[in-house]
């Protein structure tokens, strides 16, 4: 009789209530696994970000120990955050795919829209030498040589070179080569390149001849760019954290202190 009852139950299948119970149980188990995985990924991203932020901050400490102050940058936004990237075009062309524009220069018509960014990392390498070397035998070399001696008015060049008429790329290269402190900081930078905390290299467009040199910090654990902040002379590297917004309580900085939360948080 018992065997017959089991056989009969198997033949009639599950009731709607039984199916719903099974679905609920599976949903609860799946949700638990998802939450555990999400929490694990979040902790992994946070740990990766902290490691990267503090690795780059060692360069800041080294820079300050040598020069007595943290680097000053010219490309800060309204909240005092600056890009870490250092970028310049090595050879110029016009391209509808990558948006590159042919850059020309003359004393009567200087060009200041060349896409150059003197971010924080431009302080960690001999930048005049880098620009000079990467633009050799290209149509940009003479342009940059002119910018060093006659920077376009109101451009990032004028701000970085302090608008001095005494600037010269050959002289700047010579100063950089003799600056043992800069060479030491650059060796530390190179070590971070090997460790994967920062990057540098040429990038070419697949549709044109444009080559761009770029150097900077690898993104944080959430795939977002790090920033540099020099508020009150206290330089720090900052990640926007999980929410992707700078200036909120989940920011991760090299100073180890979370900033105050926004009013709308």
Image (tube, grey):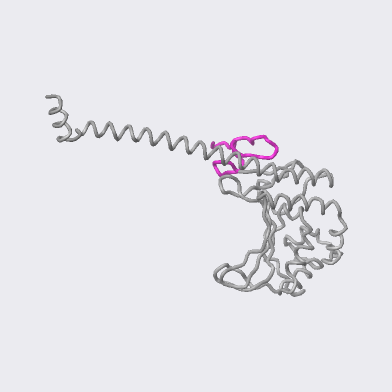
Image location (x, y in percent) of residue 231: 72, 42
Which residue occupies the extreme top position in the image? 1
The total number of labels drawn is: 0
- Along the line of sight, which residue is nearer the eye, 2 or 197? 2
Determine if residue 30 is in view: yes
Image location (x, y in percent) of residue 240: 60, 43
Image location (x, y in percent) of residue 61: 77, 43
- Along the line of sight, which residue is nearer the eye, 217 or 234? 217
| Residue 260 magenta | yes
Residue drawn at 71 percent across, 42 percent down: 236
Q: Which region of the structure is painted magenta?
A: 240-265
Q: Is residue 201 above or below residue 224?
A: below
Quarter assignment of residue 95: bottom right
Q: Is residue 239 above or below residue 7?
A: below
Quarter assignment of residue 52: top right
- Along the line of sight, which residue is nearer the eye, 197 or 257? 197
Quarter assignment of residue 136: bottom right
- Along the line of sight, which residue is nearer the eye, 262 or 192? 192
Residue drawn at 76 percent across, 67 percent down: 133
Image location (x, y in percent) of residue 5: 14, 27
| Residue 72 magenta | no
Q: Is residue 79 above or below residue 95?
A: above
Looking at the rendering, in which quadrant would you find the C terminus?
A: top right
Identify the main secondary structure in magenta: loop
């Amino acid at each position: 009789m018992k065997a017959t009852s089991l056989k009969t139950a198997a033949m009639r299948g599950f009731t709607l209530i039984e199916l719903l119970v099974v679905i609920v149980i599976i949903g609860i188990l799946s949700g638990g696994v998802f939450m555990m995985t999400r929490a694990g990924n979040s902790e992994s991203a946070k740990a990766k970000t902290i490691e990267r932020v503090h690795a780059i901050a060692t360069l800041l400490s080294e820079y300050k120990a040598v020069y007595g102050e943290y680097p000053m940058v010219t490309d800060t936004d309204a909240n005092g955050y600056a890009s870490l990237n250092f970028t310049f075009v090595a050879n110029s062309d016009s391209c509808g795919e990558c948006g590159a524009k042919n850059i020309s220069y003359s004393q009567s018509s200087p060009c200041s829209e060349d896409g150059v960014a003197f971010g924080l990392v431009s302080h960690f390498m001999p930048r005049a030498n880098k620009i000079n070397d990467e633009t050799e035998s290209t149509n940009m070399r003479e342009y940059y040589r002119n910018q060093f001696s006659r920077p376009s008015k109101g451009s990032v060049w004028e701000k970085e070179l302090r608008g001095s008429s005494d600037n010269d790329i050959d002289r700047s290269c010579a100063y950089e080569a003799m600056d043992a402190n800069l060479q030491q900081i650059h060796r530390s930078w190179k070590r971070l390149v090997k460790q994967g905390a920062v990057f540098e290299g040429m990038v070419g467009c697949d549709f044109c001849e444009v080559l761009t040199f770029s150097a900077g910090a690898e993104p944080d654990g959430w795939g977002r760019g790090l920033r540099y902040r020099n508020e009150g002379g206290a330089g720090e590297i900052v990640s926007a954290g999980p929410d992707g917004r700078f200036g909120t309580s989940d920011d991760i900085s090299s100073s180890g202190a979370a900033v105050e939360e926004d009013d709308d948080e």
